[in-house]
Image (tube, rainbow, N blue to C red):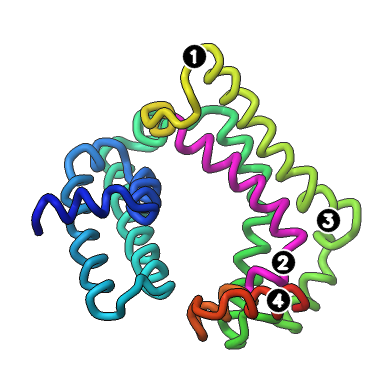
Amino acid sequence: MNNSKSIALANTKDHIFLKVLLLLYPLPYRKHFENEMVLVFNDMYEEELQEYGKIRFIFWFSQAIDLLKSVFEQHEDFLRKYGVKKYTRNILHLNKYNILGVFFLLPFVSVFFIDVISRIVQGNLSHPNELVLHGLYNTPLYWFPILFTWVIIFPLLAFAVNVIPLVIKLLMKGRKFTNVLFIKENIVTIAISLTGIFVISLVTLHDFLPCLINSLLVHGGSNLGNIILVCRNA
């Protein structure tokens, strides 16, 4: 693949999105293989454009799944190589705020994945699995004080305990949030902060998002306006 094609793609939003996804890889691995992975992606991107005339949603979905699988494999390799302590400190760059944030997000993330998997099993992403939903409703998790805690308070705390130290560090070092090095050094903290915001957003869009994803997978994005209107009433 020629360099001019790579440079052209490097200026697109899609390429920026890819670079963000590649931040999930361990830093030592990225240093050695990032350029090679970008070139491979560029080839697949161009093939998708030539065959279909556009970049379909399913292309991004399959690329994201493959990339996440590879990310988990690489982190597993580094965990075996370094051991838990060195892996946590030198590869993940985890700090006490990150661990606390993960603890706060764990209840919601667990219930969220149970819901998603149950929807996939029933073959309908637009509506919850009534059997699983009924089972969850009968657990202490759905007693209102507890529900409000893990749905609202915990995600807010996960966001706060990570974003506040991040902002302080940003101000002390005099860097911009868009600084690539700063993002790489704090990718876990940023990810946890964004997840906290995502959880709060998901509370108000819990039926809209599954409907939107299901419709995009089935019908594609050519009629996005109508899909959004339908899913708003889901």
Question: Horizontally, is 48 left or right of 200 in the view?
Answer: left
Which is in the foreground here, disc 3 or disc 4?
Answer: 4
C-beta proximity under 8 Å, tags 3 and 4 = no
Q: Secondary structure at mark 3?
A: helix
Q: Position of residue 73 (x, y in %)?
A: 31, 55
Quadrant for the C terminus in the image: bottom right
Tell me which segment is drawn in magenta: 186-210
Residue 72 location, quadrant: bottom left
Q: Nearer the viewer, mark 1 or mark 3?
A: 1
Quick check: 203 left or right of 63?
right
Q: Position of residue 36 (x, y in %)?
A: 16, 50
Disc 1 versus disc 2: nearer the observer: 1
C-alpha distance separating marks 2 and 3:
15 Å
Q: Main secondary structure of the magenta part?
A: helix
Sequence-wise first label, 1 or 4: 1
Task: Tell me where residue 51 sits by quadrant.
Answer: bottom left
Disc 4: CA contacts within 10 A as few (<14), some (14-19) or many (>=20): few
Which residue shows up at 53% across the image and 35% down it? 189
Q: CA distance from mark 2 to mark 4?
A: 15 Å
User: What residue did someone put label 4 on?
Assistant: 229
Distance from disc 3 to disc 4, alpha carbons, whole Å, reads: 29 Å
* Secondary element at tag 1: loop
Query: Tag 4's secondary structure?
Result: helix
The numbered mark, 2 or 4, whose residue comes first in the sequence reads 2
Q: Which residue is mark 1?
A: 174
Q: Are marks 1 and 3 in contact (CB under 8 Å)?
A: no
Name the residue beneath numbered marker 3.
147
